[in-house]
Image (spheres, helix red, strand yellow):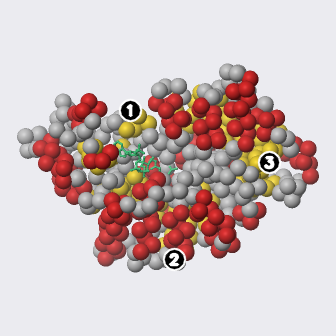
Amino acid sequence: IMERIKNKDYHDKIMSAMEAAALIKDGMTIATSGFTPAGYPKAVPKALAERIKREGIDLKINLYTGASVGDELDGELARVGAIKKRLPYQTQSDCRNKINCGEIDYIDMHLSHVSDFVRYGFLSKIDIAIVEAIAITEEGYIIPSTSLGNTPAFIENAELVIIEINTRHPKELEGIHDVYQPLKPPNRIPIPVITPKDRIGETYIKVSPDKIKAIVISDIPDSVKEFPEIDEISQRMADNLIDFLENEVDNKRLPENLLPLQSGVGAVANAVLGGLVKSKFSGLSIYSEVIQDSVLDLIDSDKVNIASGSSLTLSPKGLERFYNNIAKYKDKIILRPQEISNSPEVIRRLGVISMNTAIEVDIYGDVNSTNIMGTKMMNGIGGSGDFTRNAYISIFTTPSTAKGGKISSIVPLVSHCDHTEHDVQVVITEQGVADLRGLSPKEKAKVIINNCAHPDYKDALLEYYSNEMNQCHISHKLNEALSWHYRFLSTGTMKK
Ligand code: 0RQ
């Protein structure tokens, strides 16, 4: 272990997870490493939950992270009632349930905003940053693990820092990170990322040594789940997406090797990106936030030359594959802070093609990515807004129905809006593609219903958008607009 902590002054800071957890007091704001769910601290939060259970104490913290984190952090702390406020993104079921019953206050934020909000003093002061690392250099700098997230800004703005050195990750991961922190306005200068492969910072995070109060050794793995097999619906969405991109190339609106690609989280996003492996495209690049298993497939098949993101969201099998070929992948993958991976400035400059998943889309192209039936938080907006608004082409995919056909994902009016019709350019379901660019809302409605809705719901949508409605610009029958959701909640199906 001493090989991993090269600075000898730090050796007497090594302590048990339980001793480090004792530094955390009621009412504190704790900010951690971790991004969807990679590179988050595990031993200290587990020890904290154990202490709360054992001592029966009432201890609540505000918990800030990069994005979603695993059960050892969100799950353990949610179950013992230790989270008062949570931001900016989560996917853990116990945490989600407590958000939905009002026990946890949740701030669902654009991921690119978080570091700036911390830097500008818009959020409560960070008492302790807990960060997972693979090593500490001779100079006392921190080498992060499988993600970068908000870690540099959290460390810089925290009173104290606890480091979890995770020996599960090989030391060879060093060099994959590119740490760059923008200055505060009015002194901010352009972020010098001109192509996805540009390295603009350092491979470590600088920290003032007296901030580091504890170093804990752990070997708990990240808890990224295996992806389900790609099903027929996902395959058809992937095929439709690839047809759309080929058509863009044929029409000279995209170069032959496309433009940098961003792909969201989840099974659908993984399948859609995986579909590119079998496509005719090559020389591709990725400028995204999560690097999922499908990116390794794209690198292995020589389709992708460079993948830039904020985390290695690899399944256990994917991570094993990565570690077995680390030299090869390290050449082609860069991990950046999320304010850089998701920077609107960089996304707009590079011309990123964004591909995110919708929960539901309405007939004008507004997208709900977060709240089921308008009231139950699923995960959060994550980085989908950072990319969508600034993309060269913004695409949303969704199966045309959910819950075995009882829900239409194309609805008269979204029950919650994350991405407005102004931002959403292309909608893709397994039924087809709605290219909304250059269309008025009246034109959009027809294309979305005809190309994307499931046949079981098409007539009802056309009936809703019938000629009797005053089709001026955006028209709604206000007494019917959310009746589909209401019908599902009261009868178990959106079908009449
Ligand atoms: O629920 O698990 O209870 O069956 O939503 O849906 O189809 O499995 O799709 O895993 O790809 O997730 C939008 C949630 C999709 C995700 C969302 C129900 C469905 C299922 C999941 P069950 P699927 P996925 C980059 C970008 C926002 C953040 C984002 C997400 C569950 O992609 O969180 O884009 N996106 N970040 O049954 C009721 C509908 C439904 C529905 C789906 N219309 N009505 N339930 N479901 N559609 C990453 C980061 O930001 C870090």
Vertical comparison of 486 with 69: above or below: above
Residue at the spot of label 3: 217
Residue at the spot of label 2: 301
Task: Give the residue at x 16% y 38%.
Answer: 496
Spot occupied by residue 246 in the image (x, y as percentages of width and height): 34, 73
Question: Is the C-beta separation of discs 1 and 2 under 8 Å?
Answer: no
| Relative to 270, 30 lies left or right | right
Could you tell me how far apart the alpha carbons at marks 2 and 3 are, in whole angstroms? 37 Å
Label 3 Cα crowd, 10 Å radius (few <14 / some 14-19 / many 20+): many
Ligand 1 has an atom within 8 Å of the beta carbon of the residue at disc 3: no
Vertical comparison of 112 with 476: above or below: below
Question: Is the C-beta separation of discs 2 and 3 under 8 Å?
Answer: no
Regarding residue 186, the answer to whether it shows in the image is: no
Residue 375 - label: 1
| Relative to 344, 411 lies left or right | left
Regarding residue 258, the answer to whether it shows in the image is: yes
- Disc 2 on helix, strand or loop? loop
Among numbered discs 1 and 2, the one appearing first in the sequence: 2
Q: Amino acid at mark 1?
A: Thr
Q: Amino acid at mark 3?
A: Ile
Task: Give the residue at x 53% y 56%.
Answer: 226
